[in-house]
Amino acid sequence: MNTLVTILFFTFLASILSLFLVGILLFKEELMKKFSFSLVSFAAGALLATGFLDTMKETIEKGGDNAFLWIAISFAAFFVIERLFIFIHHHGEEDKKALEDEMRLPVGFLLSGDGMHNFIDGISIATSFLVSFPLGLVTATAVFIHEIPHELGDFGILIHKGYGRWKVFGFNFLTGVLAILGALIAFYVGSFFEKIIPVMLAITTANFLYLSATDLLPEIHTKAKRSLAFNETFFFILGILLIWGLIKLLG
């Protein structure tokens, strides 16, 4: 299969198919409430394992000692972007619960953040497939897994704001298309400028590690702090084992 076709196919599966699955869950509220937090834990493990066991390894092989520097710079860049995003939206407001802050976010800002997130996912998938099919498959799997709890969160916020389910689905479909755009840009840039592939892999690695360490894992600790969270721990480890097994199988 042509590399571009492969990239577009798996980007579609990872971003758009996950959106349809979440859309189905929206009409199964009890099921959504039952499994949503387990999915967050599962995604955290999958992203962490993909970053450390797969994309980081390829980044080092392609970029040498500079790989660590680019990963660190990319990680820091995600931190700066997130702080600017929070400053713009919450500057001048009193500290309140994180969920309440999320609920006050204007829809345009929420969707723009989601669009940027999907755009980076598209870049990650395309860059990985430009290196090898196994790496691309593992990356697409990790993106697919973490997109489900991510979309569940966005859907929940928008529904809470009073939007109908179909309108919410349409909003998220439009932002999901940006993953395709990111994949296309990464494919053509990476194909013509092979030297920047290690940098793109570093961004991919930093993206996975940052999302797991600063977004998903703190959410688990916050919501499960009153218990030992056996269920969340199980799904977190299961996410790691799934990616590890997939890497071994494809390697």
Image (cartoon, rainbow, N blue to C red):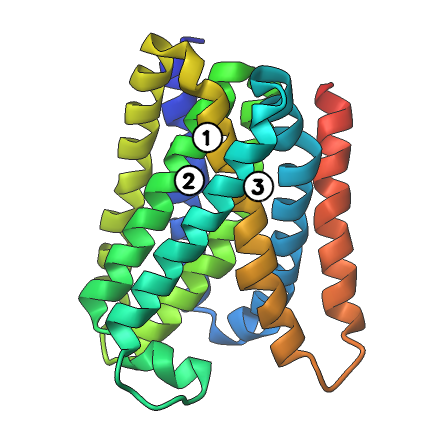
| Residue sitting nearer the eye, 26 or 237 | 237
On residue 125, the disc is 1
At x 38%, y 60%, the residue is 82
Q: Is residue 202 above or below residue 133?
A: below
Q: Is residue 123 above or below residue 236?
A: above
> In the rendered image, is residue 143 in sight?
no
Distance in Å between CA atoms under marks 2 and 3: 10 Å
Mark earlier in primary sequence (2, 3): 2
Callout 3 crowding tier (Cα within 10 Å): few <14, some 14–19, many ≥20: many
Look at label 2 and name its amino acid.
Asp
Q: Which residue is mark 3?
A: 142
Q: Quadrant of residue 14?
A: top left
Precedes in sequence: disc 1 or disc 3: 1
Going 78% across and 61% down the picture, which residue do you hit?
A: 234
At numbered mark 2, what does the secondary structure look like: helix, strand or loop?
A: helix
Numbered disc 3: secondary structure? helix
Query: Mark 3 and mark 2 in contact (Cβ < 8 Å)?
Result: no
Q: Which residue is mark 2?
A: 121
Residue 139 vs residue 101, the one in the foreground: 101
